[in-house]
Amino acid sequence: MRILPVVLLLVFARAACAQHDHAHDDLGSLPLDFSADLLLAAGTSSADDETIESLQGGEHDPRRRGFTLRQLEFAMFGEAKPFDGSEITLGGAGILSVGEEEIHAEEIYLTIGELPHRFTVEAGLSLTEFGGLNPVHPHDWLWNDQAVVITRMFGPEGMAGVGVQVTHELALPWASTIHVGMQEAFSERSPSFGGTFGGHAHDGEEEEAAGVGGRPLIERDRASLKDFAYSLRWLHGFDLNEDVSMAAGASLMFGPNATGYDGRTMLWGADFNLTIFSGDGDERRVAAEWLTEFIVREYDADEFADEGDPLDPVDDIDLDDATLEDWGLYSQLVYHFDPEWAAGVRVDFATSKGRDFHIDDNDFEPADENPLRDDRLRISPLLTWAPVEAIRFRLQCNFDNADHLDENAQSIWLGFEWRFGSRRHQHE
C-alpha cells in the first residue's frame, strides 16, 4: 500500500506539468514551475540496524543496511506581478516529501517580494533561516546525510514552523541581508522548543519521547507573543577577487520550551563559507567550497513535579529547574577536480553539559548513553560524480566515534539522485 501514494503523486505531477504547458498560453504573467527530486541510498555498516538509526538521526539519512528511499520530493512554484506599474511580486510554493512510511509537507508558503526598501515577506510553513544548512533541502546537500549538530539542535528534518519570515537587503557596499522570523514553537518540527525528541534506547528498552535531556513535558497554552519562536540571521557576502567569494553569517533563535511555563530555549551560531571559482564565460564553475558552522543551545528546563500513584511514593517525580548546554560544529571542504567529479571531507563534532533524566528509572545519569547528547566525532570522506546535470552519485564513508557506542562504527553509503523540472527552491 505504500507504493500507491507514490503512483498517485506521479500521476498528479504529470497532469500538473501538462496543465502548466497550457497555462503559459493564457497566463503568461503567471509562470508555474514543477520539479521532482528522487534520493536513494544503498550501503552497509559495521554497526547493526538499531545502532545505525542512533547514528543516522536525520529523516532523510541512509538509516539501515541495504537500500533506503531517502526522499521523493515534489515542488510547485508560481510568481506574478499583479499590479500595473509596480515591481511588487506575489509568489507561492508547495513542497511535498514522500518517504517510505509517510507523506508530509516540507514547506507551503506565500511570498511578497520587491517591496519598497528591499523587503520580502514569506508567510506559511517554511524552514527557519538559521545557519548554512538548516534552510537547505536534502537534494542540495553535498553529503548523503544531515550534519550531526543540525540533527541534535533542529531534529530529524530541520527546524521549520508556521509563521512569518521577513528578509531585508541592506544598502551597503557589499551584499548584506537580515532575516527576522516569528514561527510556531509547539510543533514536531521544533524539538528544541515546544516539540519533542524521540525517545532513545536505554538498558535495551525504548523510552518515551521527551524534551532535551529526557526532561518531562507539559501541555502549554499560547498565552502571549512570548510563546512563539523568534529567529534573527545576518548574512554578509564579499568578493575577495574575481575568483574568490566569502560569506559570513550569525544566527540567533529563542522561544519557549514545554518543560513548564518558565522553560525557555536559546540557540546561537556562526557560519563561514568560502567559494573559489575557475574558468571564464560558459566554462566558469565552482572549483572548491569550504563551509563551517558552529551552534550552541541553552535549554532552560523548568521545575517539574508529578505525584504519580498516591499509594506509591517511590514513583514521585520532583525536578528542580536546570540549564542543559549543548554545542557542536561541522566543517566541510569539497574540491571539484573535474566538471563531473568532486572529492571532499566533512568533520562533525558535538558535545553537551548537564545530566539526562530517565523517567523510567526516575533518576539522573550522564548523557553518555544518549545519542542526541553524548560526545560525538564523525569524519566523512566523499566522492561525487555527476555525469549529467540531472543525475548525481555520492559515495560517502562515515567513521563514527560516540560515547553511546560500545565500539567505533564504520559505514559506507552510495547515494543516487535524479532530479527533473525547475529547481527554484534552492536556498542561497
Image (tube, helix red, strand yellow):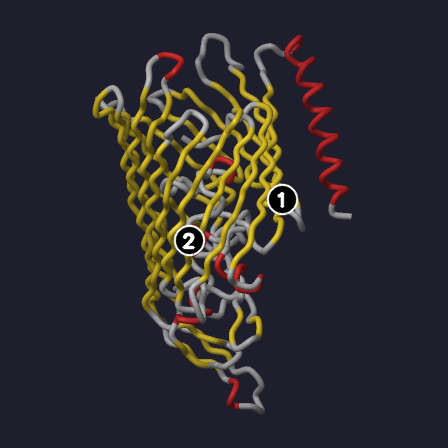
Q: Where is residue 207 in the image (x, y as percent from the top left)?
A: 55, 71
Q: Which amino acid does label 1 sit on?
A: His
Q: Where is residue 358 in the image (x, y as percent from the top left)?
A: 47, 76
The quadrant of the image that shows the C terminus is top left
Q: Residue 104 carries which label?
A: 1
Relative vertical location of residue 17 with respect to residue 136 in this rendering, above or below: above
Asked which quadrant contains residue 12, the reply is top right
Relative vertical location of residue 417 with respect to residue 214 in this rendering, above or below: above
Q: Residue 144 carries which label?
A: none
In this view, the residue in front, 427 or 340, is 340
Residue found at x 26% / y 26%: 244
Q: Earlier in the sequence, mark 1 or mark 2?
A: 1
Q: Which amino acid does label 2 sit on?
A: Val
Asked which quadrant contains residue 135, the reply is top left
Q: Position of residue 47 (x, y in %)?
A: 52, 63
Q: How far is the residue under mark 1 from the one under mark 2? A: 23 Å
Q: Say whether residue 408 is visible.
A: yes
The residue carrying mark 2 is: 148
